[in-house]
Amino acid sequence: MKIAYFTHSLASCWNHGNAHFLRGVLRELHARGHAVRALEPVDSWSLTNLMADAGEAGLNAYRTAYPELGSEIFDPATDAAELVDDADLVIVHEWNEPALVAAIARLRAAGGRFKLLFHDTHHRAVSDPEAIRAFDLSGYDGVLAFGETLSEVYRRWGWGTRVWTWHEAADTRLFHPPAEEQDRNGLVWIGNWGDGERTQELEDFLFQPAAAAGLPLDIYGVRYPDEAKAMLAGHGARYHGWAPNAAAPTIFARHLATVHVPRRYYTTILPGIPTIRVFEALACGLPLVSAPWEDAEGLFRVGQDFLMVKDGAAMADALAAIRDDADLRASLIASGLETIRARHSCAHRVDELLGIVETLSTTPTAGGLGPRLSEELQGTAS
């Protein structure tokens, strides 16, 4: 099958977590003999920021880890028909321009023989619904949503059985325990500061508990303003700046544990959706302790694959237990790896995707979400 995926960026993971998952999925599809193309717009904000932050060398880890992958850079003015070419399946990520999304929809509606899916991996459907409503998805065959609560939003918007929950997962070709163990010390947290979505939560569930447990804390990520860096320094944490995702397994291998601090949207209006770092950390055999979130879909065995705590004091206690109890660490590692390998690899997600594609017809589907939403749906934000 010939597959074209329109992404914001495949080359850059700078503040662009979907690149992690996409790389693993495309590599798995390539390994199974499918012809895959990743198309990304010229001057994407993620790649532009990566170049400013790390220069051309910032792409080295990605290129080394994924030699079989590459991107086709396109100008937004390019005719969409040229970009789609002879693809059998086209998937368009939600971080694309509305004009491109609509142009591909028109091609499909006009009789395009490719199957067409929209891929949503963000909370904008509830946090900024007008940004999603700007997309004309009327020619799309369906929606891939990265959590059941997000799928429910699309169902309320009229997609019914044409929305599928397609969680992120770990690329287990890259994310796995180290071949040889080395000395491990302290905690690591790889995550971006963002827009204040979890500032207090980070202090309550990461910075203060790490200090209370006497564990050194290494922080990697971007978009940390001066006040955030001052907060880290005040808690004794070491800030290292951006790290390429392809280097994360090596970083994980130097540490005893990590912490999951979900953004507020994923604990309130879109519960049940973990960050991809949970999948990746467990795949690397790194014990994990999480701030509260509702695993509404039963993705993991909470208390067995990882620990979940209710407050900062409990987080400090859990981190100290992991520090001191080798049997606890071994149990969490074994359970987490078991669940990832059984359910949450990119190979599993490719199986799911191919199953979804088998249900689609080559005949264009009428209807869908777009500017022609009914008045009552336009008033629905979640």
Image (cartoon, grey):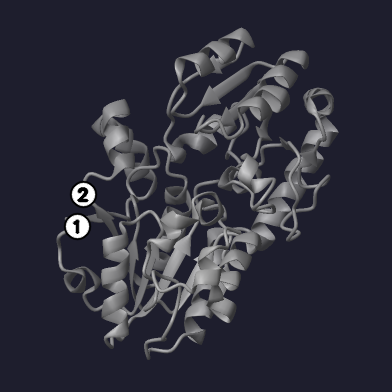
Q: Which residue is mark 1?
A: 76
Q: Residue 36 has which mark?
A: none
What amino acid type should be assigned to the residue bearing mark 1? Pro
Residue displayed at 58% across by 80% down: 161
Residue displayed at 43% across by 38% down: 15
Q: Which residue is more in the foreground, 203 or 368?
A: 368
In the picture shown, does residue 253 fall above or below 213? Answer: below
Residue displayed at 30% across by 57% down: 97
For residue 110, side relative to residue 246 (left or right): left
Q: Quadrant of the N terminus?
A: bottom left
Q: Is residue 368 visible?
A: yes
User: Which of the two marks, 2 or 1, is nearer to us in this view?
Assistant: 1
For residue 178, side relative to residue 91 (left or right): right
Circle 1 residues within 10 Å: few <14, some 14–19, many ≥20: some
Secondary element at image label 1: loop
Label 2 to label 1: alpha-carbon separation: 8 Å
Circle 2 residues within 10 Å: few <14, some 14–19, many ≥20: some
Q: Which residue is mark 2?
A: 42
> Horizontal and vertical percent for residue 341?
65, 57
> Horizontal and vertical percent for residue 370?
41, 70
- Count of marks placed on residues: 2
Q: Which residue is more in the foreground, 375 or 323?
A: 375
Q: Earlier in the sequence, mark 2 or mark 1?
A: 2
For residue 96, side relative to residue 281 (left or right): left
Circles 2 and 1, Cβ within 8 Å, touching? The answer is yes
In the picture shown, does residue 161 fall above or below 249? Answer: below
> Horizontal and vertical percent for residue 57?
28, 31
What amino acid type should be assigned to the residue bearing mark 2? Val
Secondary element at image label 2: loop
> Horizontal and vertical percent for residue 211?
71, 14
* Residue 371, quarter of picture: bottom left
